[in-house]
Amino acid sequence: MSDIYHSRVPWFPALFSGRRCPVRWAVTFGQTTWWTVGEAEVDPAWRWHEDCRKRQFARDGKLRFLCRYLGEWFTGIFKYRILAQAYLSISYEVGARRAEKG
């Protein structure tokens, strides 16, 4: 499993945050996680969340994961009309938040 740490915001999360100021983000795709912070700033709960994401990718495969993740997100957008609520309702996110408890 691979982790890549950055001391400043990389382009991918910055694109979605809509700002240039540093924000705490992690993006996991497959078995690689890109962090917007240094390794010392990653607390165990956050690491467990992203490690859960790696297990989800390994279990479902990249294509199925992406199709299901995006499908649930778009369904949530239409259902809730609130982006944050749509994101929080994605089953993969629900599982990863549960994993944060260790």
Image (tube, rainbow, N blue to C red):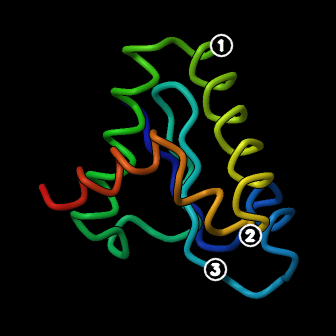
Cα separation between marks 2 and 3: 21 Å
Compared across the picture, whether 7 is left or right of 39 comes to right
Numbered circle sitting on residue 15: none
**How far apart are the alpha carbons under marks 1 and 3?**
28 Å
- Judged from the image, the secondary structure of the residue bearing numbered disc 1 is helix
Looking at the picture, how far across and down is residue 44, in whole percent?
21, 64
Local packing at callout 3 (Cα closer than 10 Å; few below 14, some 14-19, many 20+) is some
Q: Quadrant of the N terminus?
A: top left
| Mark 1 residue crowding within 10 angstroms, few (<14) / some (14–19) / many (20+) | few
For label 3, the residue is 23
Residue 12 placement, left or right of 23: right
Which residue bears the numbered disc 2? 82
Circle nearer the viewer, 1 or 3: 1
Q: Amino acid at mark 1?
A: Leu
Q: Which is more toward the observer, 82 or 11?
A: 82
Examine the image and state in which quarter residue 51 appears: top left
Q: Nearer the viewer, mark 2 or mark 3?
A: 2
**Closer to viewer: mark 2 or mark 1:** 2
Q: Residue at x 25, y 54 (%)?
A: 98
Q: Residue at x 63, y 80 (%)?
A: 23
Task: Please tell me which residue lies in front, 30 or 69.
Answer: 69
Check the picture and name the quadrant holding the C terminus.
bottom left
